[in-house]
Structures are given as C-alpha cells and as structure tokens.
Amino acid sequence: MFCRSSCRSSTTRAAFAWYESAVTDMSTRRELGLKYLAEVDRHIKDATRRITSLRGYIADLERDGHDAGALRDALVALEATLQRMANHRAIIVLTLDSLDRPNY
C-alpha cells in the first residue's frame, strides 16, 4: 500500500493508486521509490542552498539600508515549500519501509 492515510490531495492519491496498479513487482517498486527519493533529496539540497543564499542577500540589502520586504516574503514561501518537500520525503521513506514488511 502506497501512502493511503498520509496523502492529502486527491491528485496525489490518484497518482499513487495508478502507481500501485501499474507496478506490481516489489523490487521494481523499491527501485522506482529509491530513484524518486534521490530526486527529492536533490530538490531539497538545491532549495536549502537557495534559501541560504537568499538569506545572505537579504542581510546584505538590509545592512546597506535597502528594503528587502518582498524578498523576505519570497523567503517565507521558499521555506514553506522546503517544509512540504521534507514532509513528502518522509512519506516516501515510510512507503519504502512498508515495502519491506509483509502484508498480512
């Protein structure tokens, strides 16, 4: 079972339902899941790097007396997106762990 209770949107649930029906071999599921996890990890690493850079840029602007309000708003949005990515990653890890458990 691929993330039944933790998936919130109907689109996400539909995607996982398709995945479950399309991929029946557990080793294939695991392989695809690990590839997806690696992709999500790359996105998280990139987002973290961008957030760190933006924080530095905001600090430089404010130190020089410039208004960085719009950039601060963008930073808040990026941080919220990063949190969603981390939550999504946790779901993937739980799903991969569930593939190792027997279904009885």
Image (tube, rainbow, N blue to C red):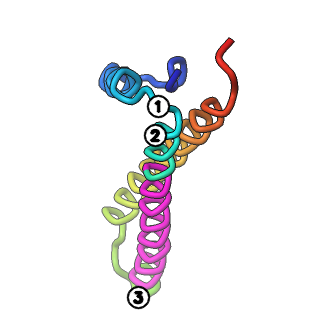
Which quarter of the figure has residue 22? top left
Residue 44: x, y in percent? 48, 59
Residue 38: x, y in percent? 48, 57
Label 1 with label 3: CB-CB less than 8 Å? no
What is the quadrant of the C terminus in the image? top right
Marker disc for residue 28: 2
Q: Earlier in the sequence, mark 1 or mark 3?
A: 1
Report the predominant secondary structure element of the magenta stretch.
Answer: helix
Counting the numbered discs, the total is 3
Q: Residues within 10 Å of mark 1 (few under 14, many from 20)?
A: few
Q: CA distance from mark 3 to mark 2?
A: 54 Å
Residue at horizontal 40%, vertical 62%?
Answer: 72
Q: Which residues are magenta?
A: 36-61
The amino acid marked with disc number 2 is Thr
Q: CA distance from mark 1 to mark 3?
A: 59 Å
Q: Residue furthest top?
A: 104
Marker disc for residue 74: none
Question: Residue at label 1?
Answer: 25
Identify the secondary structure beneath mark 1: loop
Front disc: 1 or 3: 1
Identify the secondary structure beneath mark 2: helix
Front disc: 3 or 2: 2
Residue 58: x, y in percent? 42, 75
The amino acid marked with disc number 3 is Asp
Marker disc for residue 64: 3
The amino acid marked with disc number 1 is Asp
- Left or right? Give the position of 70 relative to 93: left
Q: Nearer the viewer, residue 83 or 42?
A: 42
